[in-house]
Image (cartoon, helix red, strand yellow):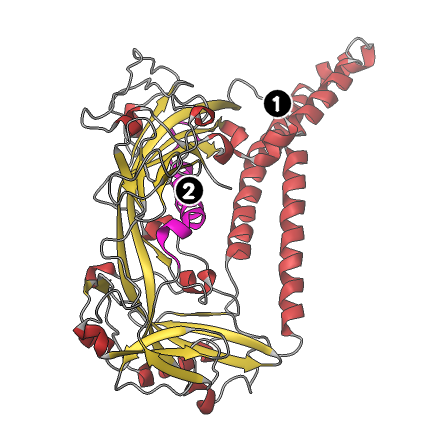
Amino acid sequence: MAIWDNPANGAGGFDASKIRTFSADSVKCPNCASNLVFDSDHGACICRNCGGLFDPETYDKVGSFGLVNPEKNYDGTIEVSKEDEARVEIVCNSCGAEIVTDKNTAATFCAFCGSPALVSRRLTREFKPDYIIPFQFDKEKAIKIFEEHCTGIDHLPKNFKSQKVLAKMTGLYVPTWIISSEVEVNVVGKGKMGKMVDDAYAENHTSTHGNFATLTYGVVKFRLKNVPFDGEIKIANRLMAAAEPFDYSELVRFKPEYLQGFFAEKYDEQPLDITDRIYKRLDSYALKVCDEVTFGYDDFVPESDASITKYKNQDIKYALLPCWFLSIDYDGRNYQYIVNGQTGKVSGEFPYAKGWETIERTGRRARMEAVSLNSSLRALLYLTPVLVLGILRAISSFSRSSAFMLFIFNHPIELLILLITLGAVCYLCAEILPKIMRGREKKDLAILAQSSSHDLAPAQGVEAYYDSSFPITAYETTKDFISVESGWKYGEREKFDFKTAMPEAEESGLDENATDFEKKGMGRKMMQ
């Protein structure tokens, strides 16, 4: 059970309406003695002081969004550490950004907005990251990488960048929460066979013996590893996600020496503050993994609104990730860019030279219309057998006439050729052409899904964060998620025949060491 799970209706969980409101005089946190409150988003009692989550019935700890080494404010109650005495805090008077660096690093402008209005002051809060990925190259190489990237972008304005602007590129360590978790999905979706895998057929035709779709239930288990979430409000989440992935095998314990010559942001969002963002990203990855599982059908389409996700054995790290930041003002708009300080990947949105954006959008619109036309034509082609059957019935209406019988008697070979031709045309139009057109449509959709070199790079897919040491386990279940086959795993399709496999139902049991919270089977519907 993940620390961010909600109880699912009818999944064996407690009724939140029966939980009393926790007052300051009732229940205290077993960790820090602060007040506990019930949080429906997590399906547990939560301590807003230390981040601990507890079973509302037993108060056993079921997870935590707290920090291993929480940072404290230098408000006179704690002494400034020797390490922090060697650091200064630089504040931008324009955008309010607060960055940390060593005393010997000079700052002439803000890494985020480019403003030179900076003020240095003594550190107001401890600076205690757990891990760091050191920068792999210097500023000169970062500028060269950015220039090479710009060279590969067609239709970029000639006066967009200059050496004076590029000189403002700043090395910054970004505070990041790195989350790993085991995932279990009680997935509900449509198992499709035959032509039902084609939406054009499914929308316009009814199921037959060989072409059908059926509501399917299953359980999918896997593990996500090192999914990053930046903890800085002033950095656009989408921009930081576009700079991924990082190689976390190069994570090392934080040492002050790594900070020399660079800046570092202090987090202003903890994991407890960004649970919605965590939910949505992990749920999207869970849905993509389920979409790859077929359960023995030709295709399986999961339904997010009916599926339940559970997370357990989570691990949270607080790390600093290296990024080169650049802010460019052009044509009345501010453009922000990141060069990944480890891999050299460039992310950011680039402007078009005058007129080219309209041309590119027109081309994409034309391709989208072609996809729509393709789908409509396939729906018509699937009607070919009906049209041929109508022709044959029309011919049969003349079968009693002597002229028709005489024609059959005098031209048997010609009639046979005609029937064979009709059958071939019917098979070509109803079976072969739709498959060819569907393949073409998939290619067009793949092209449309590709982002332009002017746009932000797409966010990383689940393949970047799937833990291959924890293989996917998937099996079909009843609607109550009771296994209908034991031991079948994704990738071993030959062991599963959806038509004949009907073993005795075997109820899946929980680990004997599971907490009471996990035993209640609480889950949470996927977030849209």
Q: Position of residue 288 (x, y in %)?
A: 41, 42
Q: Which residue in the structure is indicated by mark 2?
A: 283
As displayed, is residue 310 above or below residue 147? above
Quadrant position of residue 507: top left
Q: CA distance from mark 1 to mark 2?
A: 32 Å
Does 238 appear in magenta?
Answer: no
Residue at 36% x, 23% y is 476
Number of other residues with Cα within 10 Å of mark 1, as a class: few under 14, some 14 to 19, many 20 or more: few
Residue 345 position in % (x across, y down): 36, 69
Q: Amino acid at mark 1?
A: Thr
SS under mark 1: loop
Would you say 141 lies left or right of 209 here?
left
What element does badge 2 sit on? helix
Q: Main secondary structure of the magenta part?
A: helix
Question: Of marks 1 and 2, which one's residue comes earlier in the chain?
Answer: 1
Where are the magenta residues, as a range? 269-298
Which residue is more in the foreground, 125 or 266?
125
Residue 522, above or below 156: above
- Which x, y percent locates residue 148? 40, 80
Q: Nearer the viewer, residue 323 or 273?
A: 273
Q: Which residue is mark 1?
A: 206
Residue 260's disc is none
Whether residue 145 is visible here, answered yes or no, is no
Q: Please identify the quadrant where the N terminus is shown.
A: top left
Residue farthest toward the top in the current orientation of the protein: 400
